[in-house]
């Protein structure tokens, strides 16, 4: 079986929102008409299924006499981390070794566009300069009310929604639907699940029976996220028996935007200058590569937080610092930034190690730090921000809430080794930090800047120091690893970082290439 056929099969399934078992891919690729087999397999799976099994494919082949034709599709990343072989359920992007030396680096032309009019970079959703929260109760009410209103709009068209106070007045046995924010999740004595939903008019208890298929979805729920449920009221009207549950989610029909010309962006994070474990040689090799002809189409560098190691972020951190002064850390980062070609557009957002407030949304760096990091006049924005680069919307989020999602959800749905999976959950919930009151600190604002009101074309995070990538309903989800070798703290919590990788996105196709510099 040609490897290219397998890649095309996985890519085509990913474009339709599905993963596939290894055997399923093999069966489709070996069919006389892979394209027709894909169509029949997709038609045969249940509506809420995310994975095409070998059995689905066998049924499709048995039910249809294949014709002789070959599917063609431009292959791109469809899931998995950087160790995933292309023949499995996920297709890895091309991974190449970066050159440690730049041929003619010193002021040599790289072939990047000399016409600045061809470039465009616009920032949306930036909290910088717009923070109004004072920490009072009314501010928190305003944040959650804004969250509910904006996310509920994504759900109301899908269910016959009624406010909870109206549902309380309905007769027992009636069909009902509620769009609400989860205020409580608990199991009953009989093993069922009771989910308390709240809207602007009150609360209502909703029961998910343990023997229903959707009971498996309950372990994906987080407090404070907005969902919709449909079902039937009990005889006394005091509880809703849930028949269906909906997340705001990304539509399966979503089609991302692309650039009008061949141009590429490097998406990295977690540089951690100031740490004794900062990977200097890997960074310099990356900067050298950016000066080569091979990288001439890489016109944008987007950094998703943690420029420096910071001070006092975790216990005994001072013992692992190469630079103990925070401003000197940023000065050294600026020196490393100067190694990057001066004809690139650069954007920086902060992370939890940076010298900004910890509570999200985080504003961009203050004037003193902007002055220090003025090399190449970078764009600076808050965390999170949506950056539209030549028509491609990229949601930049450092990723602290990934810790929360991984801690709360089952391992098969969220883990550190596959950081794109918890990112899928955030896309499904359309919020980068849905749960309040845990490890993720959330600042109350008039507007909830953490809502994904618009679907991004690319979702870029860092923070967990692991490389992972995949497509969720055609949105490219990417966690870009780090530039810091394992610290003693990371070793104590069993984090083995992925160091020195530079994911490169072709903005005209959203294909992904991983450059390795370690």
Image: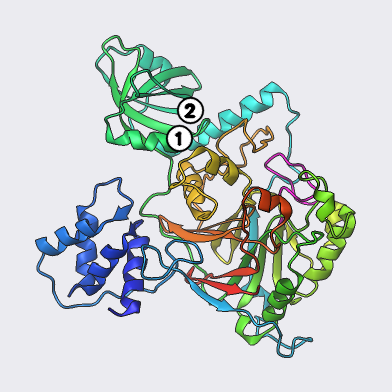
Toward which corner of the image does residue 164 lie, by quadrant?
top left
Q: Residues within 10 Å of mark 1 (few under 14, many from 20)?
A: many
Mark 1 vs mark 2: in front:
1
Picture coordinates of residue 229 (x, y %)? 36, 30
- Magenta span has 186? no
Residue, disc 1: 221
Tell me the chief SS of the magenta region.
loop
Q: Which badge, 1 or 2, is on the more N-terminal residue?
A: 2
Rendered-image quadrant of the N terminus: bottom left
SS under mark 1: loop
Task: Measuring from the top left, give residue 59's x and y in whole percent.
Answer: 15, 58
Q: Mark 1 and mark 2: span between their CA atoms?
A: 8 Å
Which range is magenta?
349-366
State left or right for residue 78 relative to residue 486. left
Looking at the image, residue 194 lies above or below residue 492: above
- As drawn, which residue projects farthest toward the bottom? 104
Residue occupying the far top of the picture: 236
Q: Is residue 288 above or below residue 126?
A: below
Residue at which label 2 appears: 182
For the residues bearing labels 1 and 2, Cβ distance under 8 angstroms: yes
């Amino acid at each position: 079986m040609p490897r290219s056929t397998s890649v095309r099969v996985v890519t085509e399934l990913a474009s339709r929102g599905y993963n596939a078992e290894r055997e399923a891919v093999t069966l489709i690729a070996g069919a006389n008409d892979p394209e027709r087999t894909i169509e029949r397999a997709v038609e045969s799976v249940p509506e809420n299924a995310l994975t095409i099994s070998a059995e689905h494919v066998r049924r499709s082949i048995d039910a249809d006499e294949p014709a002789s034709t070959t599917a063609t599709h431009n292959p791109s990343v469809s899931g998995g981390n950087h160790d995933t072989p292309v023949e499995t359920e996920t297709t890895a992007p091309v991974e190449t070794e970066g050159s440690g030396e730049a041929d003619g680096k010193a002021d040599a032309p790289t072939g990047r566009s000399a016409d600045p009019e061809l470039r465009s970079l616009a920032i949306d959703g930036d909290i910088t300069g717009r923070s109004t929260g004072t920490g009072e109760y009314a501010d928190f009410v305003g944040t959650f009310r804004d969250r509910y209103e904006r996310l509920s709009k994504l759900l109301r068209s899908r269910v016959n929604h009624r406010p909870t106070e109206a549902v309380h007045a309905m007769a027992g046995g009636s069909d009902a639907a509620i769009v609400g924010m989860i205020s409580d999740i608990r199991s009953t004595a009989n093993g069922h699940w009771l989910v308390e939903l709240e809207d602007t008019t009150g609360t209502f208890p909703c029961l998910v029976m343990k023997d229903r298929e959707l009971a498996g979805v309950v372990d994906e729920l987080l407090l404070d996220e907005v969902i919709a449920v449909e079902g039937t009221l009990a005889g006394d009207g005091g509880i809703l028996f849930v028949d269906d549950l909906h997340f705001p989610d990304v539509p399966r029909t979503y089609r991302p935007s692309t650039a009008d010309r061949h141009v590429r962006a490097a998406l990295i994070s977690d540089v951690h200058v100031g740490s004794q474990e900062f990977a200097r040689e890997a960074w310099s090799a990356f900067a050298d590569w950016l000066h080569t002809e091979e990288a001439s189409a890489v016109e944008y560098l987007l950094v998703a937080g943690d420029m420096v190691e910071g001070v006092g972020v975790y216990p005994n951190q001072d013992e692992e610092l190469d630079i103990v002064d925070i401003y000197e850390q940023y000065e050294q980062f600026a020196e490393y930034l100067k190694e990057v070609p001066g004809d690139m557009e650069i954007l920086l957002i902060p992370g939890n190690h940076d010298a900004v407030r910890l509570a999200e949304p985080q504003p961009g760096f203050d004037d003193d730090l902007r002055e220090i990091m003025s090399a190449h006049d970078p764009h600076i924005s808050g965390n999170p921000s949506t950056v539209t680069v030549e028509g491609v919307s990229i949601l930049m989020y450092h990723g602290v809430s990934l810790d929360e999602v991984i801690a709360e959800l089952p391992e098969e749905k969220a883990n550190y080794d596959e950081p794109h999976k918890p990112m899928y959950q955030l896309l499904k919930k359309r919020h980068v930090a849905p749960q309040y009151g845990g490890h993720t600190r959330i600042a109350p604002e008039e507007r909830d800047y953490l809502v994904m009101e618009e679907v991004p074309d690319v979702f870029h995070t860092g923070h967990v120091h692991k490389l992972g990538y995949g497509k969720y309903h055609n949105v490219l989800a990417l966690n870009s690893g780090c530039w810091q070798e394992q610290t003693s703290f990371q070793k104590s919590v069993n984090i083995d970082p992925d160091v020195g990788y530079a994911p490169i996105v072709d903005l005209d196709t959203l294909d992904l290439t991983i450059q390795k510099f370690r």
